[in-house]
Image (tube, helix red, strand yellow):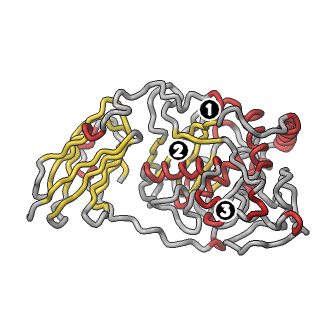
Amino acid sequence: MLISIQRVFTCLLLSSCFASTLAAQDTPTPVDPATVIRCHTHHKHQEMRASDPGLDARRADINAQIDEWIATHPSTSQDAVIIIPVVVHVLTGPGMPPIYYDQIRSQIDVLSQDFRRSNPDKVLTPNVFSSVAADTEIDFCLADTDPNGNYTSGVTYTTTSVDNIGNTSAYYLTASGGHDIWDPDSYLNIWVCQIGDGILGFTFQPGVAPANRDGMVIDYRYFGNIGTATPPYNLGRTTTHELGHWFNLEHIWGDAFCGNDGVADTPEQETFTSGCPSFPQFSCNNNADGGDMFMNYMDYSNDACMNLFTAGQKQRMLATIDVQRPGLKSSNGCSLNSVPSWRGSDFSESLSVFPNPSTGEFTAYIEFNAPSTVDLRVYNQLGQVVERNQFTQFYSGNLPIDLSQQPAGLYLVELTTPFGIATKKVQVLEH
Ligand SMILES: [Zn+2]
């Protein structure tokens, strides 16, 4: 259960607030790649094009500026890593399970690893491509400061009644049941929701979408690498791929038979790759170039079979940031302008439980002096989660916890916040 409240007292009036009990989640049943649409970005582009006669000329102009930047910046090495503030708008629609903060965190970690080439599976990049594999020197942080300069967890939660909202025009409008964008010049906006029609995600290249929808939409089943993440797209690479498009990358096959992706160091490739073929595969006479680079993030391979961006793709992304999205480099989104006074403090002080021992009904008292995202889990001795509550705007208060349906024994209460974890052992007596 997902609860967004200003004060926990409000919640105490609602008896259902604390009914949340969650068994340890198993990995969801895999989906058949033949039944999904790996990426809807090209389709969305065509959709926008149909109603925007100026789009082609605008895109041509942007690409010309980017090509000029690349021509005048032959070295791709940066003075400093660019850190992009990210805000995730979770839109919980009908029948959709809650998306917890740790799943969102897991996606940000994947982005950091993939873009900085610190992904553990980089060792799987074939030798023939290892010389072009790049650390893009682009990194990500969950925003800690909102557009008004206030502290934020970097996540907004909205409960919506709109079915498959990601494939409607409602997701980017609060008034329609979605959530308004945060200034896309300063934040990368990711809406996590149900999209429907088997679509994993989509975004817009620069100049394609109006500012109020200039972000990415990812289906909740393909976001992050834990929780609801569904094989074979459960390693967070859908977001890595879509972010490549947001930075103006094309698909590796150029969306045409042996097409051009505008990048010199990716071999020509006949079409997209499904599943996870064995290396090498050849097409378009690309033998001398090493064959198909189906492990590039801009192909359609399974998440586990992707592991690189190239130096050419890096250059195109850096050019795009400088030419089209320069505000990201001066954003205050991760500046912690309003540092919570408890940041860096000892979190064990923030959590107390009483009575302890108990017969299963006890209270967790949490104390903060700034609103925070809070994720409170209770584990049994097998490490299974037997109770879980999450709040997005939590100050201080009592959380009643009921383990009276659980056997007697030792349990662990764990409190996770963006800035630390506190744990307390509790004993449940025979009852
Ligand atoms: Zn794509």
Give the vertical position of 152 relative to 359 (above or below): above
Q: Name the residue under label 3.
A: 306
Mark 3 → mark 2, Cα distance in angstroms: 23 Å
Q: Which of marks 1 and 3 is nearer the N terminus?
A: 1
Q: Please, what is the three-letter code of the amino acid marked with disc 1?
A: Ser
**At numbered mark 2, what does the secondary structure look like: helix, strand or loop?**
strand
Q: In which quarter of the image is residue 26?
A: bottom left
**Image mark for residue 88:** 2
Mark 1 → mark 3, Cα distance in angstroms: 29 Å
Mark 3 or mark 2, whichever is nearer to me = 3
Residue at image coords 73%, 61%? 299
Image position of 231 (left or right of 344): right
Q: Earlier in the sequence, mark 3 or mark 2?
A: 2
**Image mark for residue 313:** none
Residue at image coords 22%, 58%? 411
Image position of 18 (left or right of 100): left
Ligand 1 shows up in the quarter that is bottom right
Q: In which quarter of the image is residue 185?
A: top right
Residue at image coords 85%, 50%? 262
Judge by depth and name the residue closer to the eye, 121 or 208. Answer: 121
Judge by depth and name the residue closer to the eye, 219 or 50. Answer: 219
Give percent across and percent down for residue 291: 82, 67
Q: Please, what is the three-letter code of the amino acid marked with disc 2?
A: Val
Judge by depth and name the residue closer to the eye, 405 or 122. Answer: 122
**At numbered mark 3, what does the secondary structure look like: helix, strand or loop?**
loop
Give the vertical position of 364 relative to 65 (above or below): below
Q: Can residue 150 be seen in this view?
A: yes
Q: Mark 1 points at which residue?
A: 186
Residue at image coords 49%, 50%? 104
Give percent across and percent down for residue 390: 35, 48
Q: Please, what is the three-letter code of the amino acid marked with disc 3?
A: Met
